[in-house]
Amino acid sequence: MPSPTPRVPAAVQWALGVAALLIGVALAWRAFGQPPADLAGPGPDVAPLWLGGWALWKGLDPADPAVQQWLWDQKGSGMRPGQFFMPYPATAALLAMPLAYVPWDQLGRPLWLGCAAALALAALVAPALSGRRVSGPGWLLAAGAGLSLLSLLDVVRHSLEIGQINALVVGITVLGGALLARDRPVLAGAVLALGAGLKLFPGVVLLAAVARRRWWALGTAALVGGAIALATARLNPGWNPLDDLGRAWLQVTIGQAHRDPPLWDLWKHRGLVFGALTLGSLVWLRARAGEPAPVGRRRLAAAVLASLAFGAGEAGGLAPPHEVLLVAPALLALLAPAAGGGWRDLAVAAALLVLVWSPLDRYPADDLFSQDHGIWLIAAVWALSMWRVALAGRAPPSEARS
């Protein structure tokens, strides 16, 4: 079947692909390839994980502020976080236990390099979010554009400087989403469960697995997640997973900007709108796919995009504004179809790069309670995501199964 949109000639694809990769590598090296020379520590945002790892080694509750304060008095150094709390699930402390082998004041550079590697991984595997087997000029083009997109996101540098793990979360989420979009459910479930143990965000991709009835992905996620939970409970017998879910729920619903709230204070209800749109788009995709017949990878990839868009709206819209980095997986999923070499997809990729380079994406360092800068980015992600889902749902069955 002929392509629904005109394709770029092969020679032009190779030229664009090589140029995109070179530009992307250059921008990525400047943005996050080298830690700053004066990086003395990882910043206070990673302190709960580092201290949580120590707490589990000692059989203590990693979410107890008093425990974290006591451990900091023993093990910490340098800048002292103003208030200890555990924004991550207790399972993240289990995964962070190896950090206890590294002194606090020596953790900054390895953490920076690990986060930079995760961002590079996200860009390199992002072409697979299209659901296609990508190689040659298409991969060069999409991967190079992905590196440029992540490098131009204004929040990336700040996230690395304050020692956030969101860059790791982005890498894990994109890898799990790409595996699911390529219909590798077992590996996808394992990766997503590991990511959800670190921060709950990657688990949002499992919405696509539910909608697409990828039971192996859900089963593997349950097994890997269960193993992580059992190990956490063994080290901390008093752990209650509901406490982790409760903190996450409070952060999503109440932990919002309390100064000049966006959209007349309606922004905190965005989950209802985004949730309804996500559910509606997934149900529509199933109806259009002619269930119970097997669905094509294009619709599976569209379901992954819809779930990532939901995560972008819900988690990317939090205060403080550095959570906007969690919009990156949806941005990469929107960019991924450029690997197919269609003019329309290249135009979308170019528009996304202009968007993140424009003044609409500027980190508000002077107002850490502001969410306004993320709203337009999230709105653009949602509009383009629903458009992509509509295209996938309207595709003939023969094209969807290609």
Image (tube, grey):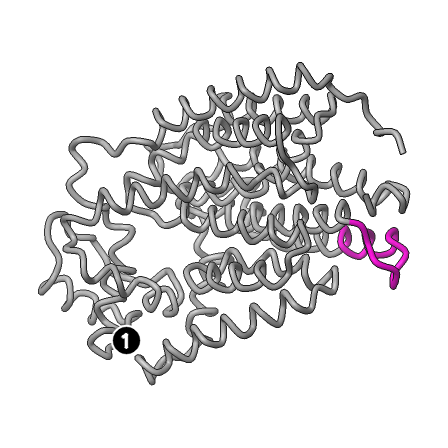
Position of the N terminus by quadrant: top right
Q: State the residue at coordinates (88%, 60%).
A: 293
Percent x, y of residue 90: 37, 69
The residue pinned by badge 1 equals 61
Percent x, y of residue 198: 41, 60
- In the rendered view, tell whether residue 399 sits above or below residue 345: below
362 falls in the magenta region = no
Magenta span of residues: 280-296
Q: Is residue 66 left or right of residue 284?
A: left
Percent x, y of residue 346: 67, 23
Q: State the residue at coordinates (47%, 47%).
A: 171
**Label 1 neighbour load within 10 Å: few <14, some 14-19, many 20+:** many
Q: State the residue at coordinates (43%, 76%).
A: 229
Between 362 and 343, the one lying in front of the other is 343
Q: State the residue at coordinates (41%, 44%).
A: 118
Snapshot quadrant of residue 39: top left
